[in-house]
Amino acid sequence: MKERTLYTLFVALLLGVSAPAFAAPAMVTINSPAEGAKLDAMAQNKISYEVVPGPNGDHVHLYVDGKEMAVLRQLKGTYTMDTLAAGNREICIKVVEKNHTPIGVEKCVKVTVQ
Amino acid sequence: MDVQNLTYALTQVVHNFGAATVVGAAVFARWPQPLSPEIRRILAWLALTGWMAQAASGAGFGAISIAFYGRPPDIHGIAVAALLVKVACAIAGFLLAAAYLRFSAGWTDGGRNRAWNGLIALGATALTAAAFLRWFS
């Protein structure tokens, strides 16, 4: 009986420890705007994205030219950005963990706002 | 069990108990009934320890991020303001509790009560800022 309990605990611990290793790797996809797209400076442009958080990711942050613009808790969706100033802009989505630290997985697109 | 989540959880345990201590000790020192100077001194030590735990565990959250990813959490706007409020409360709370322990023997009853009221206000402010830090990050 004692051995069986120990075996059960061992298996539970093994599963618990290794569970994150089976999660799909983190990944970000920006469906739109496309790389090199031209955006209207007068419009409220939208970004469409899909995220796989991976074993350590939790949610994502949206950046424009390195400045954080929004915290996005949906892993798939569309976000309406504030109007962007004219010029070349870099829009990035970074996967962050529960404490809001980027885990190193991100996707960026360069666009021209005019 | 994920080591990163475990370290965050254990740090959160310290942070939560620290928050309960700084507010609970100060409130209990004022209500529901007057307490002897000796009991209040014990509560002041609790408050001092609680603020130290708050500061250490708060720094711990940042340290864990740096340990795992080489950088601190990425927060901005209201979250940064809320964090600064929490840090200010921790510093002020620690200093006020330390001053109480060091000098309160020479204070009037009114002065001691004002110190406890200040500790209550600092604790409540820090707890309120914590909510904004949590949800505006």
Image (tube, rainbow, N blue to C red):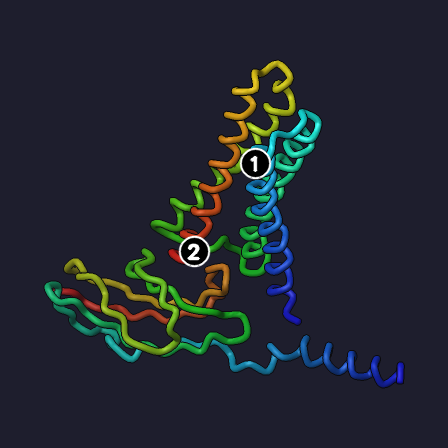
**Quadrant housing residue A31:** bottom left
**Quadrant housing residue A92:** bottom left
Q: Residue at x 51, y 36 (%)?
A: B120
Q: Residue at x 44, y 78 (%)?
A: A52
**Mark 2 neighbour class, 10 Å CA radius: few under 14, some 14 to 19, many 20 or more:** some
Q: Are marks 2 and 1 on the same chain?
A: yes
Nearer-the-camera pick, A52 or B12:
B12
User: In the displayed structure, would residue B83 be above or below residue A86?
Assistant: above
Nearer-the-camera pick, B31 or B129:
B31
Q: Residue at x 50, y 53 (%)?
A: B72
Nearer-the-camera pick, B70 or B59:
B59
- The extreme front residue here reads B33
Please name the residue that numbered disc 1 is placed on.
B31
Is B74 positioned to the left or the right of B43 in the image?
left
Helix, strand or loop at mark 1: loop
User: In the displayed structure, would residue B82 be above or below residue A36?
Assistant: above
For disc 1, the chain is B
Helix, strand or loop at mark 2: loop
Q: Earlier in the sequence, mark 2 or mark 1?
A: 1
Q: Whole-percent x and y of residue B102?
A: 64, 21
Q: How many marks?
A: 2
Q: Residue at x 85, y 85 (%)?
A: A4
Q: Which mark is residue B74?
A: 2
Mark 2 and mark 1: Cα distance apart in space: 40 Å
**Mark 1 neighbour class, 10 Å CA radius: few under 14, some 14 to 19, many 20 or more:** few
For disc 2, the chain is B
Amino acid type of the residue tagged 2 in the rendering:
Asp
Q: Which mark is residue B16?
A: none
Is A79 positioned to the left or the right of B16 in the image?
left
